[in-house]
Image (tube, helix red, strand yellow):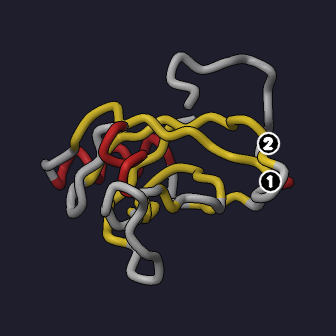
Amino acid sequence: MLCVVKTEVFGKGSPDKNGLMPVILVPVAGKIPAKFVLSGTVAKSNGFQVGKTYLTQWVAGKVDEQYGQTYNYKCLAEIDDPIQIIELMHRLGDAEVLKEKEVEVTETKSDFDL
């Protein structure tokens, strides 16, 4: 699914093994699962930079025994034009955080599975 997110440092976390702080994907438009905090390393490797807004694609990933359902996020494009953000808000709808039971999990694999 597609959504628009703004990236910010997740202040309640601690640096990962590479010394990077976790990143929270703040929903701006579209639907996003309730798990939207990424390790700093994962965020960096997927093209996310703190303080920027992105058109993002997410898919359900593997189920982790400790953490439950995981999600994979892919940065499709940076959006730096406010008019584009408004247009995407109209196309994707208001930001909506989905509870885990509301997310449709399919068996299809993503080309960016982690």
* Residue 66 pos. (x, y %): 80, 58
**Residue 79 placement: quadrant:** top left
In which quadrant will I find the N terminus? top right
Residue 70: x and y in percent read: 69, 46
- Which residue type does callout 2 highlight? Val
Look at 80% across and 21% down and name the residue there.
107
Q: Which residue is mark 1?
A: 68
Residue at position x 48%, y 35% in the image: 57
Identify the mark at residue 58; answer none if there is no mark: none
Q: Which residue is mark 2?
A: 63
- Residue type indicated by callout 1: Gly
**In which quarter of the view is residue 71 placed?**
top right
Name the residue rendered at 34%, 55% in the picture. Answer: 18
Q: Is residue 14 above or below residue 90?
A: below
Mark 2 surroundings within 10 Å by alpha-carbon count, few (fewer than 14), some (14 through 19), many (20 or more): few
Q: Distance of mark 1 from mark 2, alpha carbons? A: 5 Å
Query: Can you name the residue that lies furthest to the bottom here?
Result: 12
